[in-house]
Amino acid sequence: MKIARLTVQGAPRAAIVDAAAGILRPPTSEELARWPLVPGLDVPVLDQAVPLEGAPLLAPVVPRKVCCIGRNYAAHAAELGNSVPTRPLLFHKPATAVVGPGDTIFLPPDSNRVEHEAELAVVIGTRCRHVPPSSFASVVAGYAVLNDVTARDLQRADKQFARGKGFDTFCPIGPWLETEFDPSDVRVSCEVDGELRQDGRTAQMIFDVPTLVAAVSRVMTLEPGDVIATGTPMGVGPLTDGARVSVTVEGIGTLHNVVAADPGVPAMPPPIS
């Protein structure tokens, strides 16, 4: 079941994605009985079908926190000259970084190297802590596509991830939530202006989804709507003003965004001496 959020007359609505018919439609009573109770989808549902093409889609969920996993593909760790971690490398993106399909990724003037990172996103469906790997599916509401946009030069300069990963618009999520999905071996890819940049499979992850849910929930309580970004395959590269970036996860869909310089941002202040 694919569930999208969209704007209708200025207000958010939720709908079922019928890709074969090319429409967004109201859910059936049986679909409503299986509806995930997560922030963002707790809104009125669509009352009549509308065309999918051109629909003003929103990020499918409104997370309180976005928990990200670094260096979860060995080839990606190697391309950046990093070692492979022996346990999941956890960092966060702020909820204010989240944007949806079609939204603009703004390039901050603070950085000279902003890059794409195609990822599978796991959306938590119930409040949980200390989840064993064997029970991970019981706490997952569904899956989406995520772009972990990164100011690579700032990440390297700071030697930690908060600033380089945390700018507004640096976490596109979409195009919708897929509730019936096997994350064990699907293709994850990224194109920029039609050029294939990243092309991997989740089977290449060092730590699989059950392990990640267990590891993150061992550290902190996960709440409905929280997102775990599972890491990116090799091939990360620069995003420039005017570029169009498309991230695809097989079995879910494609998340499209445009890239632009951030207008009206003041120049960087001088360093504190």
Image: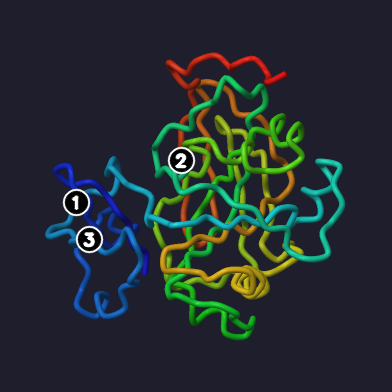
**In which quadrant will I find the C terminus?**
top right
Mark 3–mark 1 Cα distance, whole angstroms, equals 17 Å
The front one of 135 and 49 is: 135
Where 77 falls versus 222 (above or below)?
Answer: above
Amino acid type, callout 3:
Val
**Structural crowding at the residue carrying mark 3, measured as other residues with C-alpha within 10 Å and reported as few (<14), some (14–19) or many (≥20):** some
Observer-side mark, 1 or 2, equals 2
Amino acid type, callout 2:
His
Q: Residue at x 62, y 33 (%)?
A: 195
Q: Residue at x 63, y 59 (%)?
A: 230
Amino acid type, callout 1:
Val
Q: Which residue is labeled 2 in the image?
A: 256
Q: Residue at x 57, y 19 (%)?
A: 109
Q: Position of residue 169 (x, y in %)?
A: 47, 37
Q: Is residue 38 left or right of residue 196?
A: left
Q: Which residue is labeled 3 in the image?
A: 43
The front one of 221 and 242 is: 221
Q: Earlier in the sequence, mark 1 or mark 2?
A: 1
**Structural crowding at the residue carrying mark 2, measured as other residues with C-alpha within 10 Å and reported as few (<14), some (14–19) or many (≥20):** many
Label 2 SS? strand
Using the image, tell me which numbered label, if any, was put on residue 110.
none
Q: Give the quarter of the image for residue 87.
A: bottom right
Disc 3 + disc 1, Cβ < 8 Å: no
Q: Earlier in the sequence, mark 3 or mark 1?
A: 3
Q: Position of residue 240 (x, y in %)?
A: 58, 23
Where 14 falls versus 189 (above or below)?
Answer: below
Q: Position of residue 149 (x, y in %)?
A: 58, 39
Q: Earlier in the sequence, mark 3 or mark 2?
A: 3
Q: Residue at x 86, y 42 (%)?
A: 81
Q: Which residue is labeled 1 in the image?
A: 50
Mark 1–mark 2 Cα distance, whole angstroms, equals 20 Å
